[in-house]
Image (tube, rainbow, N blue to C red):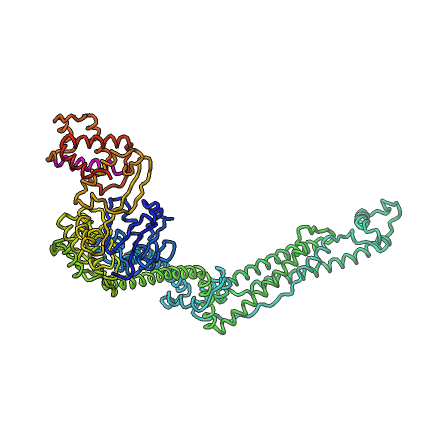
Amino acid sequence: MPATIIQRLAPLKNLGVFKDSKVADAQTCLQYNLIYGFNGTGKTTLSRVFGSLEAGALRPELPEGGTFEVQLSDGSIIKSTGELNALQGRLLVFNVDFVEESFKWKEGTARPVFYLGREQANLADQLAKTSGELKALAEPAKSAEALRVAKEKAFAQLKRDAARLIAEQLNLGRLYDAAKLATDYGIDTYTDDKLLSERRRVDLRAAIAQVSPLAKLPLLAKPELVLVNLLHVTNKIAPITVGSIALEDLQGHESMRDWIATGLAYHEKNSLEKCLFCANDVTAMRLEHLRQSIDDKFDQLKRDTKEAQTSAVALQMECKSLAGALPSSNDISQSFRTEYLALSKALGDALGNADRTVSAALALLNEKLASPNLSAPVEFLTSTDECAKIEAEIRENLDAINKLLTKHNAESDNFAEAKHTAAKNLKEHYLAEGQKGYTEANDEVKVAKKAVDGLEAEINVLKDREIELRKAVRQHGPAATIINKLIHSYLGRKEIALVPSDDGYRLDRNGKPVNGSLSEGEKTAIALCYFLSTLEAEGRKRKDLIVVLDDPVSSLDTKAMNYAFSIVKSSLGEAGQLFLLTHNLNFMNEAKKWLKTKTQKEAAKQGKLGTATLLFLDAIQTGDEKTRVSVLKELPKYIRDYESEYHYLFNLVLRFHTSPEEHSEYFYVIPNALRKLLDVFLAFKLPGPDGLTSKVETILKLEHGLDAGRTRALERLAQVESHADSLDDLVTFSSMTVEEAKEAAASLLALMEALDVEHFTRMKSICKPA
């Protein structure tokens, strides 16, 4: 026995059915400890207290707020609120949590695989998680790859289209492709200042297509434009008439000049000797003097008009000469032809406006020369401001054309370089035009590829991890031969065997893989055998271990139960301390046979110290309470001394019947106890396949003096209020009242006495209430 073992489990507070288990009521634990209890009496909770000591931390399944203390044989106490690792490494627990953590299933496509052992199960969980993560990434990776392909395809198409456009515009054929386009974009960034107008692009395309240079052209001579001066003179001359030419003595009376000239002409034409206005004599001398004065001015007017006419004709010829000197657009380099056409048209329009202006002025001057005495209208003449604008347009367009001709001549001198520049400028236009779309498409490809690369990297990491986990699962799996040997001993048959697989275990039955899941009994058997196979792992010695087994059997027949207990006994007989928790009556009886002679009472008869305790988880609930309370006490003598529960059930019903209402602490179990006791008694008294109802009716027909109503009420209550055929399945509470339960208990005892008074009397004697 190890130096330190568990001596007492108390107090236990607020741990499910353990409401307040006091130290004073605690049972002393020895080397071997059998704890028997029906379902719902706290075995699993108690195993999780042990499990907390095994793990060195509170099991998460324990009720929140619950506390416990464990007293060790050396006097030290382990508290749930303090350090829990005093027994860690020495205490091993087999319970539902161990099975759950050590036995993991993976349903394969053909047959199931399972993982055995906590380490392997943990690795299996990690493997399943990793595989799940891989599976979860499959669709995103597929979508990301599809998006990447789509983006790359779209980007490739964009590059092909853009390269094809540039090749067509520059007449490059197959000399320019998507690869060269990508190179150009990789070298430089093409901003909006590279964009050209459609007119300019037309010129550049024509220049590129030009085979040989055109002849050089002379610059246009700049004309001496006097349009404004001509209009100024014309506007001045046109209104002058003979009547407006006055004598010197008429200075200051200009408004009378027309009247004087008209009067002079009238008097001469009619040979009048007297002035019709003043009646004075009109002498020949006076007439000559007036005529001479007017003629001098008139001659000057004619000379001025003639001079203006000559200037207008010269200007008109100059404009026509300039228009005629413009080169043909066919003689202009293709690089500038469109621009030249626009400039030459603008110059022609300005020259046309000038010609129309000059023609109008010339027509007026011609008319003036023909009739100097008539005042010519000037309202239709172009204004001097408009003439100034026409002159400016002529000069500006002429200068622009001369600059263009200078470029034309330079291009003619450097034809090859000019073609190269034209091609460069045109290509840069289309590169600038497609820069935004190219950049966006390229960025989308990068983002899509980054997403794919990220997912691929994540998937590769998970794949590597999956491979390592599969290796680890195989490496950490316990030896199948050892487990199979234990399983065969446990089950008492050899048709089932574990076969290691690549990532776990496969179950074979009679040498063939088993399809479908294992039974609960088979699972428990495999998990327990694995548990037993690991007792001495990591250098442990059984004599130093504290081992806890909670319900190590499930769904086994009687023969298999004997084998199972045999393997448990042989594997754990040398353990430093052993706790066997069970609700199975047959397993309890097997353990009781083994340990009964080791109890203090029996050992004392041989002068020895006891090494075993037989304990019972006793759960009570009065009729007015809603919850049960469990306490750990000595195994009742009716269970300890007999192999069936019949005596214990009879004792329960008898105690309940004879006790006052306030002492009906076993109220919660009474409905099931009534049903089970009635079933066992009638199975012996009325053997056969009939059901409970039929047997009750048979009894009533035998006229034993039983109250038919009370007896049928007993049968109905037993049918309705019991929850199963065994106390093993107590999981819920009865809704029947204490009065109904007491009436049913009385009816059952009366029935037993009526049918077999000798049996009833002997049972009362044996099982009389304490």
Magenta stretch: dominant secondary structure? helix
Specify whether 75 is left or right of 185: left
The count of marks equals: 0
Who's the residue at 14% across and 51% down the image? 562
- Does the stretch in magenta take in 485? no
Q: In which quadrant will I find the C terminus?
A: top left
Measured from the top left, where is residue 437 in percent x and y?
A: 43, 59
The image quadrant of residue 288 is bottom right
Who's the residue at 48% across and 59% down the image? 198
The image quadrant of residue 392 is bottom right
Measured from the top left, where is residue 96 in percent x and y?
A: 26, 51
- Does the stretch in magenta take in 683? yes
Specify whether 147 is left or right of 537: right
Nearer the observer, 397 or 1? 1
Q: Check the image and report above or below for 643 versus 691.
A: below
Q: Determine the residue located farthest toward the bottom in the rendered image.
A: 413
- Per the rendered image, the range of residues in magenta is 668-684
- Is residue 471 in view from this perspective? no
- Is residue 623 in view from this perspective? yes
Q: In which quadrant will I find the N terminus?
A: bottom left
Measured from the top left, where is residue 298 in percent x and y?
A: 77, 56
Nearer the observer, 654 or 183? 654
Q: Check the image and report above or below for 425 versus 53.
A: below
